[in-house]
Amino acid sequence: MAATAACLASDALTQATSLAADLCKQFYGLGWVSGTGGSISLKVHDASTPLAQQLIIMAPSGVQKERMLPEDMYLLDADGNVLSAPSPKPAPHRPPKCSECAPLFMKAYKMRKAGAVIHSHGMESCLATMINPAAKEFRITHMEMIKGISGHGYHDELVVPIIENTPREYELTDSLAQAMGAYPKSTAVLVRNHGIYVWGDSWISAKTQAECYHYLFEAALRLHSLGLDPADPKHGPLTTLKASSCDSFSDGTVVENGTQEGVSQGFPRQQHPNPAVVVLDIEGTTTPISFVTEILFPYARDNVRNHLESTYDSQETQDDINLLRKQAEQDVTDGIPGVQLIPSTDTSKEKVVAAVETNVISMIKADRKVTALKELQGHIWRSGYMKGELQGQVFEDVPKALAQWQSAGSKVYIYSSGSREAQRLIFGNTQYGDLRPFLCGYFDTFIGNKREPKSYKEIFLSVGVDEPSQIVFATDVLQEAMAAKEAGLRAVLVVRPGNVPLPEDHGFPTVTNLLEI
């Protein structure tokens, strides 16, 4: 009680209520909260209190949002109990009532550790759910504003779940919670014919993402009006992707319609059905092992010191060094031999670079699949590609298979132990040109180890299919195939020249050419 009383008189509460009122006015100007619709809620920031325990500001229901004042806000405890309510106003004002969105906001606070939640009735968010009345998801890719959504980059496909509307707002609570559980990477849920709920770890994050979501919804609507597909990396004509990136059939196959640019280049097409989603390994699957072991790894090893010294003061390199410093500390704890602790930032540049180089060379030699190493390697390779000293290599069938899958509407992703940047560099600079337009996204070890089933479960939750069996994962590594199979994916082993021989009784289908998938 004393803590609550102190909060009621604190500057933090005054600032939070003023901020909420100001944001309501801004959102009214954007058309998000007109006609008393929509709402906002945010935590009362207190550095001494964990986010989960901070008090909550919430706008009232059924009021003119553009006329909101700080004293009109409700104050709730971390469990959603009302601690303070606004005083009634004379007629024609209605008696104050806390937002009907309150139970939905609380789901975001409890399930996603949100710092703020925005509910918008913006026209774009409403119409985006009507593009395909049967779709359970909104999808768009290759748009700059996707970078404003937490955990996403330009090349990624943004997937937002859509739930069905109900007569009363609070009746959406269960379906909203189910969507949050089914889409753990999402920071928003659309409500058909209604609007959107967006959350972030702070009011700044929630507001930024809400603006980006509305921009992307508007972009998708305009693309559709032009007959173009927002979920196609090239935003090609909708007529070529009628059963495509959005609508896969129950057996995971896709009807082939029309042609796509890759096919017009002379790439042959298979007559058998294509999978809804294909996830490809790189080394030994799309790319010769020799390219990685004989070209990429030696290039990173030979250039690590020059790269660190020439870019030492950049934030990117400092972030790389920090990751490697933490990895070294963990390796020492785990008793991994040959590890050298990396000095702190107040040590001389020469000593830091020397320690990093020693560890990196040791990790490359041991073929360690750790994120810290892969991030630095990716940045070294980027420099090599930019200088023209490196060129990505893929097998001859790879561009043909990518074109075939794209023309049939299958979505293709990459999952490799190399960083996402390293993956993009390989496919963006191949002997066949830039193959990135054929790809919908990239996964690396940030999503998990490639030999653990949970990593493939995360991929399933990210690519927008109903069942994991709608995903085909192609790899040359038996342990990876086993992990993918345990997660419910269909795994295929790829046999290429130079790959490690497979045991005869491995039990998986094999291909020597991606066109056989």
Image (cartoon, rainbow, N blue to C red):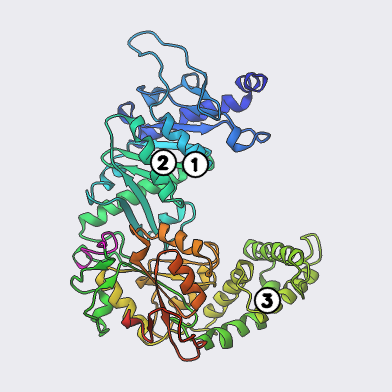
Residue highlighted by disc 2: 177
Horizontal side of residue 349 vs 197, given as left or right = right
Instruction: Tell me how far mark 2 sits from mark 3, CA to CA.
Output: 43 Å
Percent across and percent down for residue 65 are: 38, 26
Asked if residue 228 is among those painted magenta in the image, a careful observer would answer no
Percent across and percent down for residue 409 are: 27, 68
Q: Which residue is drawn at 43% across and 50% down?
A: 186
Q: Residue at x 26, y 66 (%)?
A: 236
Asked if the residue at tag 1 contacts the one at tag 2, i.e. Cβ–Cβ closer than 8 Å, the answer is: yes
Instruction: Tell me how far mark 2 sits from mark 1, CA to CA.
Output: 8 Å
Q: Is residue 355 above or below residue 222?
A: below
- Three-letter amino acid code at the position of disc 1: Met
Q: In this view, does 210 lie above or below 441?
A: above
Residue highlighted by disc 3: 363
Q: In which quarter of the image is the N terminus?
A: top right
Instruction: Let me know if residue 197 appears in the view.
Output: no
**Of callouts 1 and 3, which one flags the residue occurring earlier in the amino acid sequence?**
1
Percent across and percent down for residue 453 are: 49, 64
Residue highlighted by disc 1: 111
Tell me the element at label 2. Answer: helix
Tell me which segment is drawn in magenta.
240-250
Tell me the element at label 3. Answer: helix
